[in-house]
Image: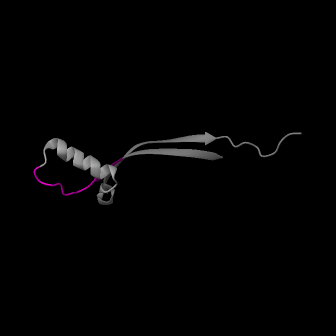
């Protein structure tokens, strides 16, 4: 029997980064988004928390490899 298991988790990551002084709120948001989009921030991300959401299983019927004549 073949079973496909799907686990859904919510992962919360945390990064501590330096942001230039003097930026307004909009510029801070853009700075963070830019660093995230370039992948630069991913090296600083640490898993902070993992919350289990759900688990499910689906039984897959296996097809016979032999053909009837």
Question: Which residue is found at the position 19% from the left and 57% from the top?
Answer: 18
Say which quarter of the image contains residue 53: top left
Q: Is residue 56 magenta?
A: no
Residue 4: percent from left, percent from top: 57, 45
Toward the viewer: 40 or 61?
40
Residue at x 28%, y 52% (from the top left corner): 35
The answer to whether 62 appears left or right of 15 in the picture is right
Quadrant hosting residue 19: bottom left
Q: Position of residue 17 (x, y in %)?
A: 22, 57
Q: Is residue 30 left or right of residue 24?
A: right
User: Vertical placement of 23 versus 40: above or below?
Assistant: above
Instruction: Work out whether residue 62 or residue 40 is closer to the camera in this orientation and state it.
Output: 40
Which is the main secondary structure of the residues drawn in magenta? loop
Q: How many marks?
A: 0
| Color style of the picture | one colour
Residue depicted at 11% across the width and 53% down the height: 21
Residue 7 placed where, x, y %? Answer: 46, 45
Decide which of 11, 38 is in the foreground and name it: 38
Q: Tell me residue 59's x, y (percent).
A: 61, 41
Which region of the structure is painted magenta?
11-22
């Amino acid at each position: 029997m073949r079973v496909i298991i799907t686990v859904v988790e919510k992962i919360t990551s945390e990064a501590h980064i330096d942001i230039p002084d003097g930026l307004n709120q909009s510029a801070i948001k853009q700075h963070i988004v830019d660093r995230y989009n370039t992948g630069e921030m991913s090296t600083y991300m640490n898993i902070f928390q993992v919350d289990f959401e759900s688990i499910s299983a689906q039984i897959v019927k296996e097809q016979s490899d032999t053909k009837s004549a």
